[in-house]
Image (cartoon, rainbow, N blue to C red):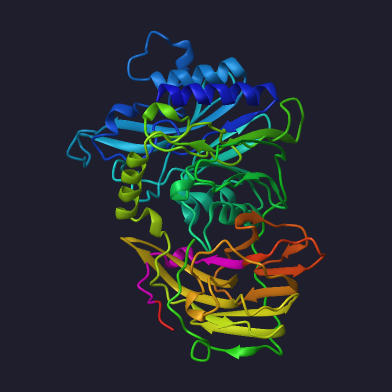
Amino acid sequence: MKKNLDIYAEQTRIASSQNVDIIVFPEDGIYGLNFNRDTIKPYLEDIPDPTEITWNPCNQSEYTNGVEVQITLSCMARNNGIYIVANMGDKKVCDADSICPDDGQRQYNTDVVFDPQGNLVARYHKQHLYFEAQFDTPSTVERVTFDTPFGKFGIITCFDILFKSPAVDLVEDLGVKNVIFPTAWMDSLPLLSAIQFHSAFAKLFKVNLLAANLHFPLFNFHGSGIYSPRRTEAYYYNDGLFSPGKLLIADVKSSPTHYRRHQVVPDTHGFRGGNSLGASFVHGQDTAEVNTQSRRNGGHYNTASRNGIISHQLADQASGVHLNNDLGPLTHRSIRNRIHNHAHLHRVNRHMVENGWATIMADNDNYQYLPLTEPKAKVKICQNEVCCYLDYQKQNTSNDELYALGVFDGLHQIEGLSWYTQVCVLLKCEFTDIASCGQPTKIAAGHFEYLKLWGTFTTEYVFPEVLVSDDGKLRLEHEHWKYLHNRIEFVNRGKERPLLSATLYGRHYDRDNSTVSNSV
């Protein structure tokens, strides 16, 4: 763990030397992954609530026992004159009158923020745990913000981003324009790769999202970025098994465009296709440091994001305990750690799979797909309350690839977790048979002259995603793509990479606890 913190210190010095205002490190970046409730205990600290007391660990060296990580981070921030965001574990002894775990304490996945003087200014306990038996869920949702000279920031962690509270609440109720996002995100194609969904969150809510992810490509942890509403300021995606992490730095406007919710009524004239009975049905698989400006400039800030590598030893990575990780996009540092023990890593992977990490989107969602067999057409496909419309013209036609228009309207469930989605997706199928549509693939060669994709959603929250292929590497594409309230439009200008998917990913938050079936 100390070696990981040494890497944090190195990356912080680099960022500070480039006038970075705030740096974000990934979730699980200090001690890593693969813990249970007992094995995580040596790495937990009692972190005070900065809204109740003033706490500057770097100035209180006489109280070193049990708060070593907080002292290290506090001094790191003060010595470099920079805001630092890091993820660690918090422990709280239970009150006498409260319901308590058998071991007498609550344990939380926690983000901490230290200001340039070393003061603890924010503490956030993650609300939505994703198979994290070592931690407890807070009894109430925390909506944590902190103010800086360059704007107000809100904090969420990893799986939180898929749910309304606190992620959407920060934007809609508290007016947050800059969102800090430490994450340990496993890519889940075709709909929920890290760079794909995180960039879409920034576009929909018109915020800056500083996303720092672990970099552990062996098990699909990769993809960090500094995302703004109109473009991706910087991102890093490298799925090479032993690829290094990377420190991302960008200059970001601290007050992006005002967020307003919209819905549009599409023009459906002339579209052929059908409802759920007329569409092709397959058992589809749904997958799912920011530099603002320089410290001395108003209206902007410099941010940095680091992808971290997890090693098999706690001490090997700034981002994690057992893996080489990408300390993630905007706010994560690049950590140059190597995998030292492959046997151990495979044990970690087995643990993840057993707990559902690798199956964020199961194959029991009844996606329906309509194959795009003509070079030019207007087509539609419907399921339940959602109809998807596509007006397209292919640039090239090939019998070696199949694209399809897909739809899903239902409750996704996995191992006791659930969230309701309404999805319209144009995607490249893994193979040329319709049954392969929705299976993960990073390979595509198809180009379109133009396309317009929209849908009839009953939710206001529709995330626009576009993912392209660069010789089997995932890439984002923004130029020549337009996102207009529940609609994606594209006109080819001759320089675009082959399309993997264009998606309208709707979230119906108020139906997350429903019993609606995924029927057709």
Between residues 310 and 117, which one lies in front from this camera angle? 310
Residue 66 in picture, x, y percent from top left: 33, 19
Please tell me whether residue 506 belongs to the stretch shown in magenta: yes
Please tell me whether residue 214 belongs to the stretch shown in magenta: no
Between residues 34 and 331, which one lies in front from this camera angle? 34
Residue 245 in picture, x, y percent from top left: 56, 37
**Residue 82 location, quadrant:** top right
Residue 368 in picture, x, y percent from top left: 50, 80
**Residue 262 location, quadrant:** bottom right
* Image vertical order of residue 272 relative to residue 509, above or below: below
Let me know if residue 294 appears in the view.
yes
Residue at image point 58% right, 46% down: 238
Residue 75 in picture, x, y percent from top left: 51, 16
| Rendered-image quadrant of the N terminus | top left
Between residues 153 and 208, which one lies in front from this camera angle? 208
Magenta stretch: give its range.
502-517
Indicate left or right for 176 with 346 as reference.
right
Indicate left or right for 166 with 404 as reference.
left
Let me know if residue 139 appears in the view.
no
The residue furthest right is: 493
Residue at image point 49% right, 46% down: 217
